[in-house]
Amino acid sequence: MDETAVKTSWTAIVLTCQNKTSARVLQTELELRQSKGLISKDTLVLALEDPRGDVGSGGATLNALLVVTEHLSAKAGFQVANESVLENANILLMHMGGDFPFSPCGRFFNTLPAKHSEESKENLYDALVTNFDYMLHVISETLSANAHAGVWICSADMLPSVDPQKRIDWNKLSDEIIVILSQENVQYAKDHGVVKLGEEGKVKDIIFRETEDEIRKCALSNGKVAVVVGTVYMNAKVASKMLNLHVFHPLDACTYYGLDNGAEPIQLSMIFDILLCLAEDVTESDFVCGERSGSYGRRNTRYETSRGYQSQLMLMRSARAQLWKSLLGLQLKGVLIENGTLDYMKASGECYRRQMLSSTNLLNFSGKSFDCNRLTHVTPCMSESFSDYGSSVVINSIIDDSIIIRKDSVVSHCHLKGGMQFGCGSVLIGLTSRDLEVCLCDMCIIRCHISLPGLDVKQQTVLVAFGVHDDLQVPYMSPNSTFCNTPWKNFFDRAGISSEEVWLGVPEQERCLWNAKLFPVVYFNLHDEKRDVAPTVLELVIQILFSSFSTEKSRTDPNQNQVKRSDTHGLPSVLGDRIYGFEEVILRWRSSVRLSLKEIMSLIDSSSEFAWRKKLWFEIGKAQVNNTLKNCTNDCLLPFLKGCVKEGFAKDTLDILDQVASTATSPGVVARTLACIADVLGVMAGERAGLRSGPARNESWVNAFDLLDKGDIPAGVKALAEERSQNKHLHACWLFSRPDLLIRAARHYEGAEQILRRRAVFTAKQFFVTEKCESLPIGHWVIAEAPARADLSGCWTDTPPITYEHGGAVLTVAINLNGKKVTGARVRKIQECEIVLVIHSGEHSVKVVCRELSDLANFTQPHAPGALLKACICFLDIVTLPSSEKLSEQLFRKYQAGFELHTWSTAPQGSGLGTSSILAGVILAALLRSTGCTASIDSLIHGVMIVEQMLTTGGGWQDNVGGLMPGFNIARSQATLPLKVEVEKLNLPQATIDALAKRLLCIYSGKPRLAKNLLQDVVRNWYARFPKITVNADDLVKNAEEASKALRGGNIEKLGECMNCYRKQKCIMASGTEPKGISEMMKALEPLVLGQTLTGAGGGGFLVLLTKEPNMADKVRAVIERNKPSDELAFFEASIDLDGLTVRVEEDWDG
């Protein structure tokens, strides 16, 4: 077995079915899976109807192979089918097979208790797992992994369990055609195809439903026998031979060629007709005459005298003769699955219930990371109310918490509410509350959507009911034959119904539950000739098996498997709102149009079946979205939102998100909801619409933004929705127009989210408190200075909205560069009632004079000259905006003076040392003292958060803490609003500080950091609640606490470990935080350092190092010189600042 397997990349996947209507629906389902990334976008997907009737798996294979070859030929530029396209192709043919009442959409689309999953969820669409998905995984990643190019064929009626660690070693197989086999016991093999293997796995014989003695002759060395799994592989050479069969009569009748030429149809089994002729012990005469053929060609003495039978017999002999001639010389081998089993999906309630209850084990064993759960995609209340019924399986169902579901039940695609109760072992599929209110034990109740021509009924559905233990195919005269787990005779006797009413015109030996006309569709009122609701067969069953137990006529043999009064738990025999007496139920049943289960399956409306499932899927997801957003849980909604767009629920999804946003009271909830709307619009736009990030100030959205900014959230959300649906300025609808408009609308919703995020941070304003102090005269300078900040762990948890939705903890240290504080501001009052701003940058400076209110109004534009300074002035209300007073009037009234404010920073631009935020704190401290006020560091930390929101740059609070507080500090915020930051100063021994100072180095990488771009991505990913992001947020907080503990204990080595861990955590939080050149330099430094990390958001800026030994600056410098990522790289002497923010007053200041 090969351990290094490569998943098969399919050239084409073809799904065959028996009618054209189903093919159209299934084609849509295949394309939908492809759009969700469950099938490669490069794969050709086709859903094909069989040419006519039941051509069998062999006939369906020949037709599918012909059609897919034509498609691939056209794609390759050929004018006619060319078998050369098969040479390097990997083609998967999947046969839907016969009807399956437990999944009216077919066996392949039977829903399993699992969802598709991936670790990151970034590319995931919410999707339930079906048998199709399971089989595609098993064949693609286990059976066919590393196989040679060729054609694979599988059927829907087999569920193989395959050990993913025991793959086939295709290097040892050069054979032309392979049949996959499982090892089963003789008793199980009695109902299946058994293969007799010879030397080197050569197939000697294939038998079907033989006696135990015949089966034992095929036994393997371990006593088990090789059973057909329904999966076959053929290489390109064999595929070409199979393709050419369609030119020979009567084999052409299996393809659409024969249909178009008027050929008489035939049926061929892939295993028991086509492959049988390749078995070594099968002779030509036995094969051609039909003695060794499958069920389609065997002699039938009952009909062999009829002219039609004789004609068909001769036709089949001719077909087998052509098969023998055309395939002569091909070698058939069998490959046994190691450590695997086979489970046939028999159309019986007992089998279906067992398979569904154990399906989570099957899925977990497969090696695929399916998200398995006995409760899969159910209403939120189910998680709490289901604890008593853990042995049951519920899939894609809306279940009220008042519903009682007892053990070992299977519930799929149901919408049930009210005081309904179900007996143990129930199988409920597709039901609504209108269908029933009680269900006896071990009953299968299935609602099917059908299309019955000629009946003017709004919604054609029929309710099917039978017992879990009923055999649908066993003749009704058999002693083992039952209906609703009770003998037919008892049922007929109690109901007063004759078998002729159920099987009119059906020969007695062919009568069974499968063809019994039991199930009413529509009731004709004989008195007024009006159609009415037909009584369900379940009403009949309950009336007979429950209501009439007290009568003498209802007594039965106690040894029979009967439903007793106690089994119903004392429930009334009521169905929906209809309460009928026994006689009326019988009368209405007799007057109804009734169908057999066989007829119902042939009339299934696949489109309506899928639509019902998807409607439930959306309604359940909608409730989960509402619950997640309003309760602020960390569930990742993006896969569901993306799925809604693909499934056609985009507008409905936007409507429910609008509703949540307009009714929420928390700005945090509203902000996350608006971010979800932006995600939906982004998915609608598609991959080619452009970048999500971009400008969001189009005048069309200004009114909505203003409403949100004023706190009128319902009106603001409504205005956003109105603008989303109609853009008057561009004369186009943002929502259903070009992809570029959709992506621009998404940007504006993110802009709206930023407004709500800003309002959430504004709650911190209550913690900004000032006190009066001595007023300063005109001309006196206030000088405020502060160090830079180096973050050692926890960054990003201080960033809104993470800081108030998750809670944060950041460990920082205040540092001076080259022996000096890094940021500073000086301010003084001046005679002129104006504001003079001077921004110093090295030897250059920019002067801005504000004489009008309009000169200050652009503080919301971060790149405007003096924007930060202006925002600080407005925040402190030195000047009020807007105001009817002129700027000079306000300054004279309040201070009888103007202000001259200078600022500077000695750190390189984009340093990642938090200098912009720290400078805001420095400016606030200087301005406050100049106006006769003071504020604590704690107040300034909260004040800077407000200033940054006014400035629209966002950002967290770690810079404010790290630069304004002295030394080492750990600051924390709780997952709540109002937003409050609590700082704990780490009072370390001087010896620890000295030891750290000798090991701490700061190096400017030469590349400015890209915090703004990274911030947008991080916030977007946080709102999406990708699991890796939420888990990493937990880890960041935990690591910050561990690092602070290491500091307190003087454990420098542990601190270094935490810094290295922090470095990795930053990379998880935001990709691109380490450019390649910087990463290579850090790799080269690893032998010299205990820990290292880029400061701030990353992407560039400063690198902080903690060396293994004291005073290693020269060694570090030498390594860096050999690995410089940029010519702009610079070394700085870093020292721990033990003063933090300092403020002083001087009469004169000479700089």
Image: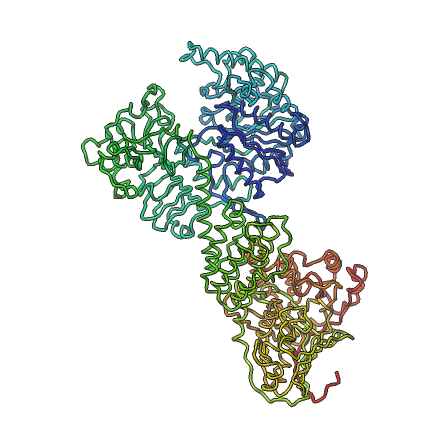
- The answer to whether residue 353 is seen in the rendering is yes
Vertical placement of 409 versus 711: above or below?
A: above
Vertical placement of 364 versus 914: above or below?
A: above
Corner quadrant of residue 616: top left
Vertical placement of 575 versus 83: above or below?
A: below
Camera-side residue of 949 and 236: 949
Corner quadrant of residue 441: top left
Corner quadrant of residue 911: bottom right
Q: Position of residue 1093 (x, y in %)?
A: 68, 63
Instruction: Give the number of marks.
Output: 0
- The answer to whether residue 1091 is seen in the rendering is no
Camera-side residue of 434 and 1143: 434
Q: Which image quarter holds the C terminus?
A: bottom right
Task: Write the residue at 64% across / 24% down.
Answer: 175
Specify whether 1001 is left or right of 217: right
Q: Position of residue 461 (x, y in %)?
A: 38, 36
Specify whether 550 is left or right of 911: left
Q: Position of residue 668 (x, y in %)?
A: 51, 63
Specify whether 1099 is left or right of 369: right
Vertical placement of 48 versus 320: above or below?
A: below
Q: Which image quarter holds the N terminus?
A: top right
